Image: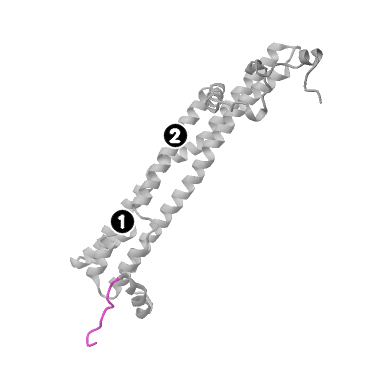
Amino acid sequence: MNDELNPAQAASTPDMQSASPDMLPVSPDMAPPPDMLQQSLDMIQAGGPVVIILIAMSIIALTIILAKLWQFGSMRLGDTRKTELALRLWRTGRADEALAVAQRSANPAAQVIAIALRGMRRGLPEERIREEAMRHGEVLVESLRGWFRPLEVISSLAPLLGLFGTVQGMIAAFRQMEAAGNAVNPSVLSGGIWVALLTTAVGLAVAIPTVAALNWLERRTERTAHRIDIALSRVFSDELTDSHQEEASYAGHGFRPAVAPGE
């Protein structure tokens, strides 16, 4: 087989070594990725002041949600074991151990139990103890509800602001159509509608997660308030439960079972 090329073939075959990089074929997979930051900036510029306001609202909402998550975690809202243990110790006559367990917990229900037990150790009237414990419980619950109102405002205003931006964009698009007269370019109208719908999309993107987070936070707060009421009522009431089952349930925590006189 003859490896030499005739002059016609040599003329039609480019020298790949001497060819410039611009002349080489580029695969679609080798194309440089789009600049996401630049695209985001372009969308913000297209959306105008409405999108900027919505972005600021999303930052505020995210900051509040993260702060509330940190607060809920520091108060150990999901940890009810020490609260149950303190109540069981109290019902078996071990008030000192019950108070020590309640004071070591940051859970609001445990804190309310600690206040009630301290008042009973001082021999205060039951009504006064209940009043003071309920007052402290209301303060704790109110602290959990803090900053819920800004989240409600953001979740309500974000879709309305998005819709407002859409209406403004549609008005601008149809004014361009009117100015163009008979020489209407469909691309101009479609571009105006795209920009108008952008604000609605951003408004929904801000409102949906804010509403979901707010509902979850409110549910946790309501559950904590209910647990405080139940725990306080259990301090001053006798429960129809088997004491042997209670002893077995908290024996694993390192406390000795209560021994009745004469045993």
Is residue 114 or residue 77 the one in the foreground? 77
Q: Which mark is residue 59?
A: 2
Is residue 171 or residue 106 the one in the foreground? 106
Is disc 2 placed on a helix, strand or loop? helix
Instruction: Relative to 178, say whether 133 is above or below.
Output: below
> Viewed as shown, does residue 150 lie left or right of 90?
right
Q: Which mark is residue 142?
A: none
> Measuring 78% from the left and 19% from the top, which residue is drawn there?
4
Q: Amino acid at mark 2?
A: Ile
| C-alpha distance separating marks 2 and 1 | 29 Å
> Measuring 27% from the left and 60% from the top, which residue is drawn there?
104
- As drawn, the residue found furthest toward the front would be 1
Q: Count the marks: how many?
A: 2
Q: Which region shows up in magenta?
A: 254-263
Q: Which mark is residue 106?
A: 1
Is residue 14 or residue 233 the one in the foreground? 14
Instruction: Relative to 92, say whether 7 is above or below.
Output: above
Instruction: Relative to 169, say whether 72 is above or below.
Output: below
> Viewed as shown, does residue 218 lie left or right of 90?
right
Is residue 246 or residue 207 the one in the foreground? 246
Is disc 1 placed on a helix, strand or loop? loop
Q: Position of residue 163 (x, y in %)?
A: 58, 30
